[in-house]
Amino acid sequence: MVHGIPNAPVDVYVDGKLTLPDFTFDQVAGPLALPAGTYRIAIRARGAAPSSAPVLAERVAVIAGEDTSIVANLTASGSPTLSVFTDPSSPVPMGDARVIVRHLAEAPGVDVYAGTSEVVTVLTNPDQATLVVPAGSVSVSVDVTGTTTTVIGPATFDFKAGTTTIVDAIGSAAGSTLTVATETY
């Protein structure tokens, strides 16, 4: 679970049970191990009564043997939403790492650079791009598509061989809170 909505501390409930109290912007929690089934995810303002109407709610299917990412994020126009992704579990080629870049921010389309090489073009909310890259340290930056305006980075990531790293662009360009949250498995 990733919290990608700025200035909105929340409590996360799974099937009515408080699972992540006081969950704040750019936090990553988990993995949470759940048996296969369908779960009701409800997100309420921090400290709200468990019986109060959730700010966001969705039923999420958990399938045996699969990993699922749930991100509370902003749409391109700034509305709160829940985005659910099935994460790949296939092996990564020897000596390489898998990188998944997700645009889940209130921001225009972006281009992603590894060093000076453009590796993802015109990524828009709520899309993702998957790359297989040689393991190692990489300087990454994100520019608004078609410009040289850098909105995230540069930041150095260490991609370890055999792993998958998910990089979620979250927050708001208008609110000057753009950042990334990462998960590695």
Image (cartoon, helix red, strand yellow):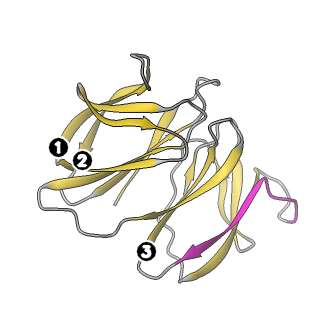
**Rendered location of residue 32, percent (x, y):** 51, 69
Locate residue 104: give its quadrant. top right
Image quadrant holding the C terminus, namely bottom left
> Which residue type carries mark 3?
Glu
Task: Say above or below: 146 vs 66.
Answer: above
> Which residue type carries mark 2?
Phe
Find out whether the residues at labels 1 and 3 contact each other: C-beta distance under 8 Å: no
Q: Which range of residues does the magenta coloring cover?
A: 51-62
Find out whether the residues at labels 2 and 3 contact each other: C-beta distance under 8 Å: no
Task: Say above or below: 92 vs 165.
Answer: below
- Disc 1 residue crowd, few under 14, some 14–19, many 20+, Cα 10 Å: few
Q: Determine whether the residue tagged by mark 1 lies in a helix, strand or loop.
A: strand
Q: Determine whether the residue tagged by mark 2 lies in a helix, strand or loop.
A: strand
- The numbered disc on residue 159 is 2
**Rendered location of residue 13, percent (x, y):** 70, 65
- The answer to which of marks 2 and 3 sits earlier in the sequence is 3
Question: Can residue 179 be seen at all in this image of the molecule?
Answer: yes
Q: Which residue is mark 1?
A: 136
Task: Say above or below: 157 vs 164.
Answer: above
Find out whether the residues at labels 1 and 2 contact each other: C-beta distance under 8 Å: yes
Q: Is residue 182 left or right of residue 125?
A: left
- Disc 3 residue crowd, few under 14, some 14–19, many 20+, Cα 10 Å: few
Q: Is residue 130 magenta?
A: no
- The answer to which of marks 1 and 3 sits earlier in the sequence is 3
Task: In this rendered view, identify the residue nearer to me: 183 or 96.
Answer: 96
CA gap, disc 1 and disc 2:
5 Å
Question: Can residue 42 be seen at all in this image of the molecule?
Answer: no
CA gap, disc 2 and disc 3:
22 Å
